[in-house]
């Protein structure tokens, strides 16, 4: 009898494979997206138009391409990561990368007071500055017009014709002018200013120069009262063929020597000049010109002392207080911890202002109350000012190190400490051999960051001393307590020595290189601590 094997049941039919559900776009969300992109595109087109008028073609093309890429990302299906990355990338490029690149570019130019615009602007300003009234020149009847916030002169010439022009805009015929008694008093599309309106803008009206023609050497019209205009001619004649300025009165010739200004044979420069690329001239000047090199080296040394001492002192005080307040035998530990971090709870600029008042030699709390009316120049003596700044910065900085050290101490396993004590180690040995190495694992990177922060700690220096007291041994606007960042501020925005953005940007690059080098070395050294973790 042969055995028969039962037939295997048929395999179940495979379920039909369905495509994953596709996300549906609601019409409302799509309309919102299109509306937002429309607003963005309108702004971009306006910006591109303005850039094109200013002949900044490269920037205009970059803006249009970026807008096209954004539209492509948000109107195309998928690309979900890009939709989230694009906004942050745009803000990063506009507010960080562009600023850094542009600042780096300025370091290789002479951009600053007297070298702001281009050469054509400088020529126009030089001619305008040399204008003086032509003796016995005729007086022209005129009124002041305004359109779209721009002022113009409507002048009646001797033959009765009306001419209109503005500041830097040559006179041209005004055929549709309105006349009263043979004098032009109005023009279609313009508002004629009355006496009270002219009084409100008298300084602007008095400063206006309306060229008689496209040739600036023919002179310009100016007015002292808004009723009569007089011819002014330029004492400086610009020869376009030779690219020189000639002083009509003295015959002195000023040439373009490639320094961004017209210079005479005696070395006298006509200001303003114009912005040019100077290569590494700002960096060379920083380390070769004695008037810059001496103060700069002093500032660099003090900056390292200020940042290094601050980090070391705040670390020492913060760790000491953390060890003290981490002892479980101490009563009211929480209350003491709150009191210790109070300097960190107040805004730093407010604390610096309070300290500035307390350290005032005339009426400060420290001199008048604590020292019984002593006259100690805490902020005006070069040495005491530095000591005062170090003390105030220690007061402001130790709570941060205390907080970090407290957290790091509480993360150290108690077994390590107990094992060291069993081996006979004392309190100092336990701290030096066990706690400190483990503290440095987490605190060393923060100390490097704190050094970089204090290297550029503008607020505490400027609010306490403004970089003073002034160093009278140099013509440079620098003080005894200036660090690099305050020196950069004074060079860039100084009221006494003028603004030199090119040199300030060069100093900024020097700061970046110093901080980057120190940070790289510091982080490489901290790698050795990772084995302890």
Image (tube, rainbow, N blue to C red):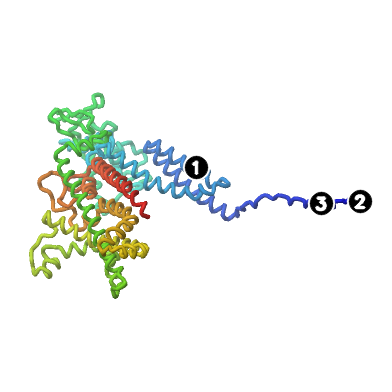
Is residue 331 shown to the viewer in this render?
yes
Which residue is identified by label 3?
8
Q: Residues within 10 Å of mark 3 (few under 14, many from 20)?
A: few
- Distance of mark 2 from mark 3, alpha carbons? 22 Å
Q: Residue at x 43, y 39 (%)?
A: 62
391, above or below 161, in the image = below
**Residue at 61 percent of width and 52 percent of height:** 23
Q: Is residue 151 left or right of residue 256?
A: right
Circle 1 sits in a helix, a strand or a loop, which is it? Answer: helix
User: Mark 1 or mark 2: which comes first in sequence?
Assistant: 2
Residue behind mark 1: 69
The residue identified by callout 2 is 1
Nearest the viewer among 387 and 98 is 387
Nearer to the camera, 504 or 51: 504
How busy is the neighbourhood of tag 1: few (under 14 within 10 Å), some, or many (20 plus)? few
Nearer to the camera, 194 or 476: 476
**x%, y% of residue 358?**
16, 65
């Amino acid at each position: 009898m042969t055995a028969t094997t039962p037939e295997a049941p048929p395999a179940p039919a495979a379920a039909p494979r369905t495509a994953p559900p596709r996300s549906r776009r609601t019409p409302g969300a799509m309309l919102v997206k299109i509306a937002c992109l429309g607003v963005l595109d309108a702004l971009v087109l306006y910006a591109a138009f303005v850039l094109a008028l200013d002949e900044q073609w490269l920037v205009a093309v970059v803006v249009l391409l970026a807008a096209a890429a954004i539209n492509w990302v948000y109107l195309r299906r998928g690309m979900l990561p890009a939709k989230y990355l694009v906004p942050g990338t745009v803000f990063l490029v506009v507010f960080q990368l562009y600023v850094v690149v542009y600042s780096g570019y300025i370091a290789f130019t002479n951009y600053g007071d007297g070298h702001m615009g281009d050469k054509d602007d400088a020529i126009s300003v030089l001619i305008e500055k040399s204008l003086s009234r032509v003796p016995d020149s005729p007086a022209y009847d005129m009124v002041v017009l305004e359109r779209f916030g721009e002022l113009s002169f409507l002048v009646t010439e001797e033959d009765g014709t009306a001419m209109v022009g503005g500041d830097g805009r040559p006179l041209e015929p005004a055929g549709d002018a309105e006349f009263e008694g043979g004098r032009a008093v109005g023009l279609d599309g313009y508002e004629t200013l009355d006496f009270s309106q002219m009084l409100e803008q008298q300084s602007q009206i008095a400063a206006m120069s309306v060229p008689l023609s496209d040739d600036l050497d023919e002179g310009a019209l100016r007015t002292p009262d808004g009723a009569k205009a007089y011819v002014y001619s330029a004492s400086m004649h610009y020869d376009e063929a030779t690219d020189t300025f000639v002083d009509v009165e003295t015959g002195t010739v000023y040439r373009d020597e490639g320094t961004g200004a017209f210079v005479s044979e005696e070395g006298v420069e006509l200001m303003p000049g114009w912005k040019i690329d100077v290569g590494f001239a700002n960096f060379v000047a920083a380390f070769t010109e004695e008037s810059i090199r001496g103060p700069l080296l002093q500032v660099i040394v003090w900056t390292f002392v200020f940042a290094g001492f601050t980090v070391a002192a705040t670390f020492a005080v913060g760790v000491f207080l953390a060890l003290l307040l981490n002892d479980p035998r101490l009563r009211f530990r929480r209350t003491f911890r709150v009191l210790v971090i109070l300097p960190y709870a107040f805004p730093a600029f407010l604390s610096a202002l309070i300290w500035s008042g307390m350290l005032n030699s005339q009426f400060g709390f420290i001199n008048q109350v604590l020292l019984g009316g002593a006259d100690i120049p805490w902020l005006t003596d070069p040495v005491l000012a530095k000591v005062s700044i170090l003390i105030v910065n220690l007061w402001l900085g130790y709570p941060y190190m205390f907080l970090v050290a407290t957290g790091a101490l509480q993360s150290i396993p108690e077994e390590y400490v107990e094992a060291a004590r069993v081996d006979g180690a004392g309190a100092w040995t336990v701290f030096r051999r066990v706690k400190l190495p483990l503290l440095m694992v987490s605190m060393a990177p923060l100390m490097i960051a704190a050094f970089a922060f204090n290297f550029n700690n503008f607020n505490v220096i400027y609010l306490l001393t403004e970089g003073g007291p002034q160093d009278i041994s140099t013509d440079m606007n620098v003080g005894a307590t200036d660090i690099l960042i305050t020196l950069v501020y004074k060079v860039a925005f100084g009221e006494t020595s003028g603004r030199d953005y090119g040199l300030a940007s060069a100093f900024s690059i020097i700061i970046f290189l110093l901080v980057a080098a120190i940070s790289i070395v510091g982080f490489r050294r901290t790698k050795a601590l990772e084995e302890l973790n």
